[in-house]
Image (spheres, grey):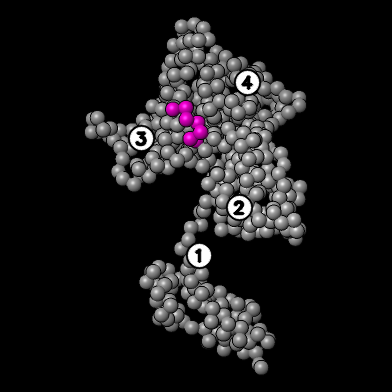
Amino acid sequence: MFAANKSELFQKLPSTDELLRQPDMQALTERDGHSAVAESIRVVLARLRQEIAGGQIGDAQLDEKSLDLALGGLSAAVERQLRQSLSYSLLPLVNATGVILHTNLGRAPLAAAALDHVRATASAYSNLEFDLSTGERGKRDVHVDRLFQKLLTVDRVGDRVEAGLGPASAERSSAAISTIVVNNNAAAVLLALNSLAEGGEVIVSRGELVEIGGSFRIPDVMSKSNSTLREVGTTNRTRVADYERAINDRTRLLLRVHRSNFEITGFTEQPGLDELVALARGRDLPLMEDLGSGALFDLRSVGITGEPGVLDSLRAGVDIVTYSGDKLLGGPQAGLISGRADLVARMRSNSLFRALRVDKLTYSALEATLLAYVKRDHDAVPVLHMMRLSKDEIARRAEKIVSRVVSAQVKSSNLKLELLDGESVIGGGAAPSAVLPTRLIALTHADLSADELSARLRASTSPVIARVEEGRVLLDLRTVFPEQDTVLVEALNSVA
Ligand SMILES: *Cc1c(COP(=O)(O)O)cnc(C)c1O
């Protein structure tokens, strides 16, 4: 048999129109529309042409037979292509990494109440910027600012008074804390710096010139804000006197940046927040802290220390704090700026604020998340619930899952499962050393490397994302929703 030459093979390919007239394609057209089907046919035909040109079809012995085979499977190929092009690219998955705020996996999953509220307010018109009592135009911030006031001011006044501070400081602390919302914390820092320090200098410690994943670098944000960075101290040691010496007529702001994703240990020194507050007050300069994570919940209650909360900073006397909505707060992506009302007012009137503002979906999700805090219903916020899970609870679920995996019952099985102690990580730039004790399911496979095994889990119908360590695949149920346990078992059964 002679190999067909390429041009003959090309001629055997049907045209898009011919294919579209076939009954099975007409059925697809009726279901998914003409243009989507035609597009899928074009993609499949182009792929075939490429295979002919590249010699995968029609080469030497393979000749027309392989083309006939390909043509026979054309309808199925078009249908597959169509299904793929019309399905979602952004998908839910099972986060079995044990990293609670996983930046690549969408950070904080939202509370059920947040989703309900988004659905209710976004599927109809809403009073986003409408004052129902006057019938006039309102402000979109009011919906969440009232809740931040409850969460950030009430305690502050109480604590000050209880702490027996004099009337002056009690009065100062009772000054309302305002909060505004922008698109993310990077935007919050940009807006705050531009509003408070445009054309002037901002003093920062060299030890805090951080880069956070996704190319957020303080020096870059500062230059975009049109303020000048004045670095003081050294990477490992900065004293309050270093800040003091750097203050001049052009100084507009003292900035402290939380070291989110790294720690400096050993021979280090950093001024206490109280020293910086005293310096800022004495020189009549605002002090801003970029907290990054910004917990509204006392992490000490889950055994994590050294991660300052928003209230800790405001109580200590920081004038402005910036933090993310989708890190420890457990809400939607947002950047939050809380602090002295007069400074926040300057940010609100900056035209950048209009460019960085968030939409009704964010306000709805944030309002519902904050309400859970106001009601002290911390378990309603998924990331807080995950942090509060005990190792025992996780171990019980892990045992149950293992007992449901078929290969765990078969001694000769290729897939081996065992349980071991390990650590879950907060992630998302929170407390770099903060870990929580957990119980892990460790997987090994007789014929697959750990990387291959984890790739198989990723390829499951519901992708499962695991950690690979020391030649093992590790699954941490802390970040797996109990409703996902069954799909996890199915994925494990399918890789066995
Ligand atoms: C995460 C983080 C940011 C960036 O926040 P986004 O909400 O991702 O924009 C900035 N600063 C610090 C200290 C952070 O931890």
Q: Is residue 416 left or right of residue 363?
A: right
Which residue position is annotated with label 3? 140
> Rounded to the nearest whole Å, what is the CA distance between mark 3 and mark 1?
39 Å
**Disc 4 vs disc 1: Cβ atoms closer than 8 Å?**
no
Looking at the image, the residue that sits furthest to the bottom is 1
Q: Amino acid at mark 2?
A: Val
Q: Earlier in the sequence, mark 2 or mark 3?
A: 3
Pointer 2: what residue? 489
Pick the quarter of the image with the C terminus. bottom right
Amino acid carrying mark 3 in the image? Arg
Query: In the image, is residue 378 part of the stretch drawn in magenta?
Result: yes
Q: Is mark 2 within 8 Å of ligand 1?
A: no
- State yes or no: discs 4 and 3 in contact (Cβ < 8 Å): no
Q: Residue at x 48, y 35 (%)?
A: 380
Q: In the figure, is residue 87 to the left or right of 307?
A: left
What residue sits 69% from the left and 56% below the top? 407
Q: Which-is-in-front pick, marks 2 and 4? A: 2
Tell me the tag on residue 243: 4
Identify the residue under disc 1. 84
- SS label for mark 4: helix
Taking the spot 66% from the left edge, 49% from the top edge, the residue there is 402
